[in-house]
Image: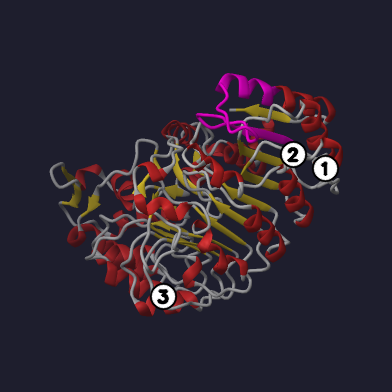
Amino acid sequence: MQCLQIAEIFSQVLFELDGYVYDSRIPCLPRIQHRQESTLRALASLARTCQAFKEPALDLLWRDIPDLFVLVKYILPESLLKYDESSKTLTLIEEPTADVWARLDPYITRIRTVGIALSSGVVARDLNGETILQPLVCYLSAGAADIDVLLPHLQHVVYQAFWTNKSYSRLLLHPYLQILELPTLAHTLAPHVNTSLQKMQTLHTLLVLDALLDQTTFTHLGALRSLISLVWEVGHTGVLAFPALRQGSGPLFLRAIDSPALKGVNILWDTLYITPSAIDFLAEHHLEQEDMIDTRDTDPAAHHLFGSTYYTFLPPILNITTLRVLEVGINVVFEVTHETLLGLAEKLPRLESLRFAPSLRGAFLFVHDEEPDAWFDTIPDLETLSLFTERCANLKKLSLAVQGCLFEDATRSTDSVVKHSSSPHLRYLELWTTALPADEPDEDFIQFFVDTFPGLEEICVVLPFKPTDPRSHKVIYRARARSRWESVVRGVALSVRGLQWNVV
């Protein structure tokens, strides 16, 4: 127990028990979904245990808070407060003295983030503007070293739509904020947020899911040299520079930027759009996260997702020759053609991660289930996959739809397959694929994966609802197709030490 009396050790123990749950759907912005309430209760108990534990526990407890409501409710005297359940608003029924306001000081300096939800979700509760918010602004302004920064160590804000009083932007949106998330803004709030954003100088991460930011704000953000990560799903006319941008996400993102420093693009959203101003390949159809479906069954506009037209979103990407990450993680399986895949390798040779598949694995439908003859002439086989990974020598992660055959021409013997250099850097391979052809033995596939990807650490094979032999086009029982793929990847695992594998 004596080691826990050393502040540095105890703080590290607490840090490992912070209770954060992250949303990993947008890799370029690892958003905190919420904090576990059990962790918060544990930290509060530790703060009351002894003097040695008090300060480190309070630091972590108050570092990230859901709103300013908790600050006022739990620190100011209960006798001065009144909560109206119908309006979900907390009011001061008596004006506090300066000494009472001063009770907030030890906690104000601990706050780093405002807006992190509890595990029970975001609670739409408010502070009365006249009796709490405006007096709080006045109190903090009187003692602030910088009149624009009222919460001196605040770095990250998740702005909620019900924070409509302009005092919230005065308290939370200071010029030196580093991370700002604007999921949805109330229309009455937009002017206050725009004014604050135009003053920001150190913002490095921004998430905007609402179209309420004005042109002046966009122009300021587009020139901001600190901004390196952007999740942008709002409308905007014109192209902005974003000189320091490294990572980005959003359906309008690629058509609205001109950043030579960009290193990663993640296109990930739950609703697909198709409008003249948006990326051409998007279809206006909502897909549930767990559904892996051919959207052509339900929406004619989704034809843009497939064949020779779906990848018209690629030209803006191909100009970013320094790109390291390209992940199109929408909830459908993109069937990239031979030509498109090899064209990507030519234009983006520095790629380290490529995904054209859903983030959740499960049975799905291929376009060829309706048009087999057209499909088999376009989708890459494993030989094309080998060529692609050879040309993208730095590739570490790959998730792609392919034919489950080693070569396209069924008349070629396995002895005549072109031998390609191995791709030793590839660590993760996820194939959304067909059944294996009856005329190619398992041993050939095992040898292909062992020779081509000797550095693999994980391989996953995802099969459609109706697996098809890529040679005969005959539907194979899914259990039989899965059993054969399991035999192949199990054989690969015997030769590649430590390989993790799965067939879904």
| 307 or 82: nearer the viewer | 307
For numbered disc 2, what is the local secondary structure? loop
- Residue that mark 3 sits on: 218
- Residue that mark 1 sits on: 417
- Label 3 to label 2, Cα distance in Å? 49 Å
In this view of the protein, can residue 54 be seen by the observer? no
| Res. 402 image quadrant | top right
Residue stretch rendered in magenta on the structure:
457-486
For numbered disc 1, what is the local secondary structure? loop
Labels 3 and 1: the sequence-earlier one: 3
- Residue type at mark 3 is Phe
- Residue that mark 2 sits on: 406
- Residue type at mark 1 is Val
- Proximity of marks 1 and 2: CB atoms separated by less than 8 Å: yes
Mark 1: few/some/many CA within 10 Å (<14, 14-19, 20+): few
Residue 141 locus on image (x, y percent): 35, 70
What residue is shown at x 61% (from left), y 52% (from top)?
Answer: 337
Q: Quadrant of the C terminus?
A: top right
- Residue type at mark 2 is Leu
